[in-house]
Amino acid sequence: MTPSEKKELRVTACKVRMGIIESTHAAKCGHPGGSLSAADMFTYLYFKELNIDPQNPKMDSRDRFVLSKGHTAPGLYSALAHRGFFPVEDLLTLRKIGSYLQGHPNMNTVPGVDMSTGSLGQGISTAAGMALAAKHQGNPCRVYTLLGDGEIQEGQVWEALMLSSHYKLDNLCVIIDNNGLQIDGAVEKVMSPYPIGDKLASFGFYVEHIDGHNFDQIEAALEHAKTIKGQPFAIIMKTTKGRGISYMENQAGWHGKAPNDAEYEQAMNELKAKLAEVEAE
């Protein structure tokens, strides 16, 4: 990608993070930590990678994205809003009674959402089904799904991985947000999933490890995925929970807690300073 393209992605990622903070603060609840750790991937997917059209969100040839860790809906919503699927100001209605933006994505109410998710482990199963269906239908679309590293403690995930390999779903890209923390603490202490890469490889996946905050590495991995034939592709991205907000970073307590007024001001000030820094480069 060109320097200007990378700069634009970094600017957009700042805005996506602002949307996460604004929406969870307005709701007084939600899941900012994992939304922030995945914000750079959300940004790259929706602003560079996916074949999508905000004016035609049900386009049959569109690429599909399934947010398997559905509780990080604030991150997905912010990316969708800034991409033009619905007004950015609607982010402030998160989890409000009557709002179409509830705590977990709803494909029946939110433009751009391909699957209703929230029950951990089920999203990847749906994504595998979508990829298999696309193969049968001759649809050239690609299917992407994002999981949390705590989520992969669910047994259903491994059934879906086994199916994906068995049917050689090379149109499927599984992304694992390895921020190392879940609601109860460090994933390695709650129920260690490590070594994640070796396990996925043993299930027949082509595996790449990247820095999930590095757009060059994100691009390289996603481009590589398109060249792999006969097996599904997995990206394990090392990230920082709460990325971009100093007091949230690497703190499990920010898994599912909204910032209060003072914390909101600090977070927004930090993000505005980062945005100004990037724009000035």
Image (cartoon, helix red, strand yellow):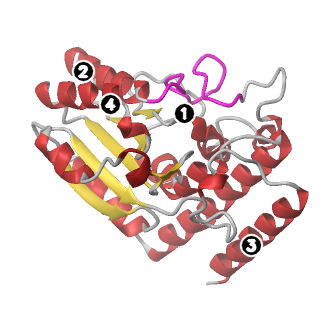
**Within 10 angstroms of label 3, few (less than 14), some, or many (20 or more) residues?**
some
Residue type at mark 1: give it. Gly
- Residue 132 is marked as 2
User: Separation of disc 2 and disc 4 at Cα?
Assistant: 16 Å
- For the N terminus, the quadrant is bottom left
Question: Horizontally, is 237 left or right of 56 in the view?
Answer: left
Q: Residue tagged by mark 3?
A: 270
What is the magenta range? Answer: 102-120
Q: Distance between the residues labelled 1 and 3?
A: 26 Å
Q: Residues within 10 Å of mark 2 (few under 14, many from 20)?
A: many
Magenta region's main secondary structure?
A: loop
> What's under tag 2, amino acid-wise?
Leu
Q: Residue 261 carries which label?
A: none
Residue matched to label 4: 157
Q: Which residue lies furthest to the bottom in this view?
A: 281
Q: What element carries label 1?
A: helix
Q: Which residue is at the front of the view, 258 or 188?
A: 188
The residue most toward the right is: 261
Q: Earlier in the sequence, mark 2 or mark 3?
A: 2
Determine whether 82 is above or below 217 in the image: above
Mark 4: which amino acid? Val
Residue that lies at the very extreme toward the front in this rendered image: 189
Q: How many labels does the image show?
A: 4
Instruction: For the residues labelled 2 and 4, say whether their Cβ atoms are less than 8 Å apart.
Output: no
Q: Name the residue under label 1.
A: 70
125 with respect to 28 (left or right):
left
Q: Is mark 3 on a helix, strand or loop?
A: helix
